[in-house]
Amino acid sequence: GAVVSQHPSWVICKSGTSVKIECRSLDFQATTMFWYRQFPKQSLMLMATSNEGSKATYEQGVEKDKFLINHASLTLSTLTVTSAHPEDSSFYICSATRDFTDTQYFGPGTRLTVL
Amino acid sequence: AQSVTQLDSQVPVFEEAPVELRCNYSSSVSVYLFWYVQYPNQGLQLLLKYLSGSTLVKGINGFEAEFNKSQTSFHLRKPSVHISDTAEYFCAVSSQDTNAGKSTFGDGTTLTVKP
């Protein structure tokens, strides 16, 4: 149990286009989802915390107009990278928790390459 | 606020040898502690977690970790490693007074098991 999926697993896009990444909890209801960014050979950097039905809370330094997060249901959160540029190329990972004291269940990640 | 320091960025070890990956943390409040493993181009998989109770925590794949509150450490150990244990390992901490899923990650330790 507690499986999280991400789609797509990888995406290549042109500079200036927008890309949407989906994060789904397949067998549980996720009250909270987290979005992380990971650069090569580096740790995970928390971008934002997303609660179902409310606006996401962004970490300091993360542009909320650049990285749009929607948590429309208890099983789906989306991250849209708007007007993507090469510096947005990264590995994006989501995670989900069932309740306040639960641990995170991670998705497999999405590799974004912006040309 | 909390922070995590993984004391070794790279740990090379021969197959069947024991290994210890070190993790220290700092926090002004009580914490939850986690170890995750990440294989190339994949998301994170939970190895083990400490929430409360016994300070010796056993996880998957033969790993265990011991919570030492006085030394603010949570070192990961395995008595005999396999080639398949080669991966990136992350220590993470969450505050007990916030969402347990909101974790701060260490910079990671690359474990390389040699034949």
Image (cartoon, rainbow, N blue to C red):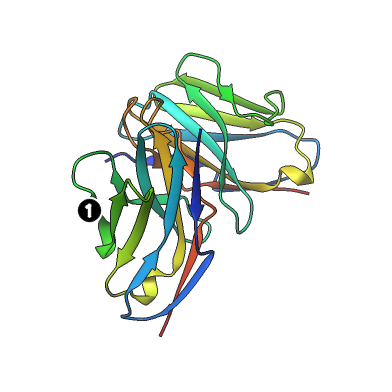
Residue A21 at x, y = what percent?
57, 36
The residue sitting at 39% across, 31% down in the picture is B29
Question: B45 or B15, which lies in front?
Answer: B15
> B16 left or right of A39?
left
Residue B88 at x, y = what percent?
48, 61
The residue sitting at 59% across, 31% down in the picture is A79
The residue sitting at 26% across, 57% down in the picture is B60
Residue B11 at x, y = what percent?
48, 71
Residue A28: image quadrant is top left
In this rendering, is residue A78 above or below A54?
A: below
Q: Residue furthest top?
A: A54
Question: B97 or A54, which lies in front?
Answer: B97
> B3 left or right of A41?
left
The residue sitting at 54% across, 35% down in the picture is A35
Q: Residue furthest front?
A: B70
Query: What residue did someone put label 1 on?
Result: B56
Residue B61: image quadrant is bottom left
**Res A103 visible:** yes
Quadrant of the frame with the C terminus of chain B: bottom left
Label 1 lies in what chain? B
In this rendering, is residue B110 above or below B95?
A: below
Residue B69 at x, y = what percent?
32, 45
